[in-house]
Image (spheres, helix red, strand yellow):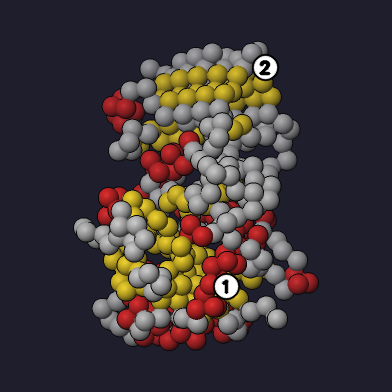
Amino acid sequence: MARPRVLSIVLAGGEGKRLMPLTMDRAKPAVPFGGTYRLIDFVLSNLANSNLRQIAVLTQYKSHSLDRHISLTWRFSTMLGNYVTPVPAQQRLGPRWYQGSADAIYQSMNLVIDEDPEYVVVFGADNIYRMDIGHMLQQHIDSGLGCTVAGIRVPRRDATAFGIIDADAENRIAGFLEKPADPPGLPDNPEESFASMGNYIFTTAMLAEALTADAADPTSRHDMGGDIIPWFVGRSQAQVYDFRDNLVPGATEEDRNYWRDVGTIDAYHHAHMDLVSVKPAFSLYNTDWPIWTSVPQEPGAKFVLRGTAEDSIVSPGCIISGGDVDSSVLSPRVRVEKWAKVEHSVLMDGVQVGRNAVIRNAILDKGVVVDEGAEIGVDRQRDAERGFTVSDGGITVVGKKVHVHAF
C-alpha cells in the first residue's frame, strides 16, 4: 500500500508575550529549553521520528534566530524529497501580516497547492511532549472524516483553563468550548475532560473549503481552534484523538503522555524542574525517540575545586569552579565560581555567576553576568525594584546580557 501524501505545517509565528523578557528579541519557538534545545525542536523531532518529513514552518515575529536555527540544524536528505523550510509571512493576498493561525495557513495555501498532499498536519511549535504522529494520522485516515484534533485528558476541575473538546463515546466532537465555566466530562470518566493540544490533522480538500469560508467571514477571528474546528464540528466532520492512546517507543511510566504548554514563565520554569529529578517527569534521555538539535562544539562539563551539581542538567562547555548547583538546568558555556549557589534555576548560554553569588528560583537569559556576592531570587520585592521580571509564582527572570551588580 502506497504511503499517503502528507504535508506538515508548524505554526511558529506567535509573539509569546507571556514569556517576556525571554521573547524580547526572539520568537517564542526559538526560546532555549532543556540546556541545548529550542522549543521548536520538540515538534520537529516528533514529526521527523514519525517519518513526516515534508515540513513548512510558518514564521512571523522576530524570526531571525528561529530561521537561523532551522536552517543550520534541520537539514534532511533532499534526495528523498524531505525538507524543513521556514516560511515568512509572504503577503500574497495583500499587504498584511497573518491575522490569526487560520489566516496564516490561508495566506500560505500555495504551499499546499504545490505539494498536493492528501492530508495536512497542522501542529503548534512551542509545547513539550513526545508523540507518534503516525498513529494519530492513521486514526484520521480510518475515520474518513475531515478533521482530527489531538486531546489530552485533564482533571475536570482544572479544565476551565483550556480549550475543551466535548466528544461522545465514539470520539466524535459535538462542541469546542473555549475555557468553559462548566467543562463537560468524558463518557468513560466524568471527572476528566479533553483539553485541545492545538494539534490537528485535516483532509486537504475540506481544509481548503474551511479556510476559504473563514477568510470570507468578516466576524471571524481567523483562529484554528476558535473558528476552523467549529466549522468542521458543525458539519459532523471532527473527531478527537485521545493522547492517552499514543505509545512512543522508549517512554517510561513517568513520562508517558507528558505534555506541557510552556506559554508562561511559571510553566516554563516548572517544565524545566520536570527534567531534573532522579525519575524525571519528562526524560530527555530516550534514545528510541530522541529530541534532535544541534549541540555546540564544546568540551565536556568540568567540575573543579570541589564544585558540585546535584539533580541537574549541565551542558557541554560549563565549568563549575567550586560552586554548588542544585535542581537546575545549565546551558552551554555557563560558569559558576567558588562558593556561589545556584538552586532551582535555569541558566542559559554563557551566563557567568561570580563568587558567593546566590541564584534561586530564577531564569537567567543568555550572556547574563552576575557579580560577586549578588543575589537573584532571594528577595522578590528587591528583584522587582531592580527592574527584573518576577512572575506570579515568584520566579525571577533576568533578560539577555544584563549585568547584575551586588548591593
- Numbered mark located on residue 138 in the image: 1
- Relative to 313, 125 lies left or right: left
Dot 1 alpha-carbon crowd within 10 angstroms: few under 14, some 14 to 19, many 20 or more: few
Location of residue 63 in the rendering, given as x and y in whole percent from the top left corner: 51, 58
Residue drawn where x is 49% and y is 49% of the image: 258
- For badge 1, the amino acid type reads Gln
Mark toward the start of the polypeptide (1 vs 2): 1
x, y percent for residue 153: 40, 56
Q: Residue furthest left?
A: 181
Q: Residues within 10 Å of mark 2 (few under 14, many from 20)?
A: few
- In front of the other: label 1 or label 2? 1
Residue type at numbered disc 2: Val
Residue 64: x percent and y percent?
55, 57
Quarter of the image that includes the N terminus: bottom right
- Asked whether 218 or 162 is in front, the reply is 162
Q: Residue at x 57, y 24 (%)?
A: 310
Residue 78 percent location from the top left of the image: 75, 70
Relative depth, front residue between 158 and 9: 158
Query: Which residue is found at the position 50% from the left and 65% from the top?
Result: 123
Distance CA(mark 1)–CA(mark 2): 52 Å
Q: Secondary structure at mark 2?
A: strand
* Residue 33 appears in the picture as rendered: no
Q: Nearer the viewer, residue 56 or 243?
A: 243
Is 75 placed above or below 269 here?
Answer: below
Which corner quadrant holds the C terminus?
A: top left
In this rendering, would 82 be left or right of 270?
right
Q: In this view of the protein, can residue 150 be seen by the observer?
A: yes
Asked if the residue under mark 2 is in contact with the one under mark 1, i.e. CB atoms within 8 Å, the reply is no
Q: Which mark is residue 304?
A: 2
